[in-house]
Structure formats: C-alpha cells, structure tokens
Image: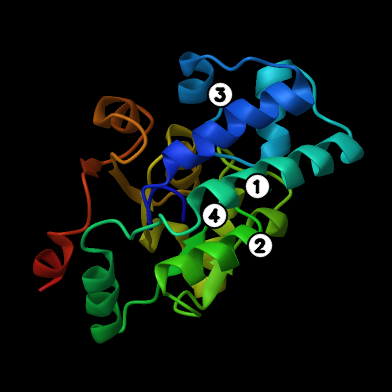
Amino acid sequence: MDGVLTANNAFHRQAWQEVASEVLGLTLSPADLDHKVDGGRNPEIIERLTGSYPDEALAARFHDAKEGRYRSLAAGALREVAGLSAYLDALDARGIPFALVTSADAVNVAFGMEQLGFGPRFVTRVLGEDVTRGKPHPEPFLLGAQRLGLNAADCLAHEDAVNGVRSAAGAGCRVVALTTTAPDSALLAAGAALAAADFTSWPDWLA
C-alpha cells in the first residue's frame, strides 16, 4: 500500500523522526530513514534501529503513536500513484486477480482506502498483523499468493522498498518495483526485475 498505491513516504518519514525522538529517544538520520526504516513492521524496524526487539508494551505504545502521527500528517493529502486506477481496471477486465500485501495494520489500511476512494476494492489482503515474520521475510507474499489460490512463482509483485522487494523476490514472485521511495539501483540490486516511476504504461502493456 505505502509507496505503491500512494506516494506517502514523506509522511511516514516525518512520523518516524518525531515519534522515535519522543518515545525511543533516538534522532534518526537520513541514512537511518533510507536503510533501516524501510519496509517491515514497526517492531522489526525498532529492532534494526536499537539492536533489540521491543517488548509488547513498548511496541504497542510506539505503534499507536507513530501511526496516529502518520494519519494526522497524511489526512487529506493522499493521492494515488499515477495510472493506478486504470491499471486495476485493466486487471479486472481481464479477470486477473490481485491482492494487497502490506506491513500496515487494519486501521492504516482502512484510512488509506478511504483517503484514496478505493473502498473495498482490494478484496484479498495480507496485513501486518496477519504474519509472524514481516518483510523482508517472504512470508507476507507467500500468504498473499496462497490467498489468491496461486503459486508465488506465478505472481507479479509491485514494491517500493528494498525490504519489500527482498520479501517478494524471496517468495518467488517476479517484481516490478516503483521508484516512489527508493532509487531504481537499490531496488534492482534487491531483486527487482524492472523499476518504473508509476503505472501509466501498464494498461497498454496488458493490452
């Protein structure tokens, strides 16, 4: 969802900087934001930042504060990545199933769907709370393929983050990454087959 359906990385980065300072006492550098706060669930990101996995109470407190801050920053400002609706329409017209595979929780997914006007469009979903091992582990995309009734090797994945690409490629998906969050060189090095700026060309390619 984040960085694929909508280019919202700036709001997440600001929320991470502010709440990491308030709750964890950390000052996050641009390098931290680029390489550690990059795909995955909040407890796993906190572990990358601090070297230790947070206990349940700290994880919950940080998650609520950070995601609440993100929603307050992003409210009214989210727009879909160019070409997305036309691409989804083209998939529907051809009977090609698709799933949302995200590290976001149910509250943020509902927020994103409402802000983008998608409602229940993504019927098949894998959320952060649905897996025990988040990105870059392949579990999220393996579960997404399973819920579509497909083998992961028969699926195409779109990702914007290095750890997301690693997750999808590790599951066996072919990955076309979007450069909304990370540069194409990093995404290709992580395992993406191709990188694109947006979805504007995809309906024509499908045709």
Q: Amino acid at mark 3?
A: Lys
Q: Residue at x 75, y 47 (%)?
A: 64
Percent across and percent down for residue 105 are 66, 57
Q: Please name the residue that numbered disc 1 is placed on.
A: 67
Q: Earlier in the sequence, mark 1 or mark 2?
A: 1
* Residue 153, quarter of the rendered image: bottom left
User: Observer-nearest residue: 115 or 48?
Assistant: 115
**Location of mark 2 (residue):** 107
Q: Foreground mark, 1 or 3? A: 1
Labelled pair 1, 2 in contact (Cβ < 8 Å): yes
Look at the image and tell me whether residue 103 can be seen.
no
Marks 2, 3: nearer the viewer: 2
Mark pair 2, 4: CA separation: 12 Å
For disc 4, the marked residue is: 102
Q: Type of residue at label 1? A: Glu
The label nearer to you, 4 versus 1, is: 1
**Label 2 – label 3 distance at C-alpha:** 23 Å
Up-down relation of residue 96 to residue 104 (above or below): below
